[in-house]
Amino acid sequence: MNRLVLASLMVATIVLGTAASGSPARSDDLRLSALQVAVTFDGMPTAFFRSVSGLSIETEVVEFREGGENGAVHKIPGRVKYPNIVLKLGFAGASDLQKWAFRIAAGQFEHKNGTIVMSDQKGQVVARYTLTNAWPTKWNGPDFDATSNDVAIETIEIAHEGLRLVTDP
């Protein structure tokens, strides 16, 4: 693989914290200014991504009224929803993730568990998440344009049944 393409895959620039809001950067913002995002699925080599989005959970609000209590409606947590994870990386030929997406499209369903690890510029882990019962639901190939100097980007969308923050090393 071309070293330039590999380098562009390994470093994803994500602006976070007060520096993004226009306030002066603090020393603790520096470690979050450039992250490396590595994703691994069962039985597949680790891949580094230009962009990972969709890390989100949403808990439905269930409202109920208590008999004799007319002053308020109680709210409790209900079902949890997990949106799809969207992975973007520089196209370097047929990857294991791309092959997995094509197997799913051909009717060979296989779900896998995955891990998303975000590291700072020094390689220190900032956050680690696990995905449960994940599988590719969508693959978009790159736009091939011989007149452009941009890296060809492919996008893979991953459906899953659970996102967990791993707090123990």
Image (spheres, rainbow, N blue to C red):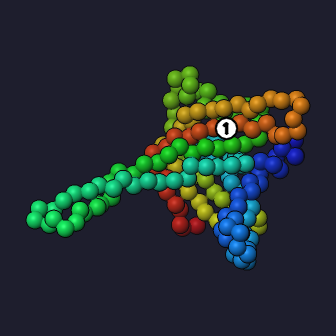
Place of residue 36 in the rendered image (x, y in percent of width and height, measured from the top left) = 72, 57
Residue 32 visible in image:
no
Which quadrant would residue 72 be assigned to in this image?
Answer: bottom left
Residue projecting furthest to the bottom = 27
Disc 1 is placed on an element classified as strand
Q: Looking at the picture, tell me which residue is in the foreground, 78 or 127.
A: 78
- Residue under circle 1? 155
Q: Looking at the picture, tell me which residue is in the foreground, 165 or 151.
A: 151
User: Residue placed at 74% from the left, 61% from the top?
Assistant: 34
User: Residue placed at 52% from the left, 23% from the top?
Assistant: 107
Instruction: Locate the C terminus and report the quarter of the image it occupies.
Output: bottom right
Place of residue 10 in the rendered image (x, y in percent of width and height, measured from the top left) = 77, 52
User: Residue placed at 55% from the left, 28% from the top?
Assistant: 104
Residue projecting furthest to the front = 71
Relative to 28, 147 lies left or right: right
Residue 137 visible in image:
yes
Residue projecting furthest to the left = 68
- Label tally: 1
User: Residue placed at 61% from the left, 49% from the top?
Assistant: 53
Q: Looking at the picture, tell me which residue is in the foreground, 118 or 140.
A: 140
Relative to 75, 117 lies left or right: right
Place of residue 147 in the rendered image (x, y in percent of width and height, measured from the top left) = 89, 31
Q: Residues within 10 Å of mark 1 (few under 14, many from 20)?
A: some
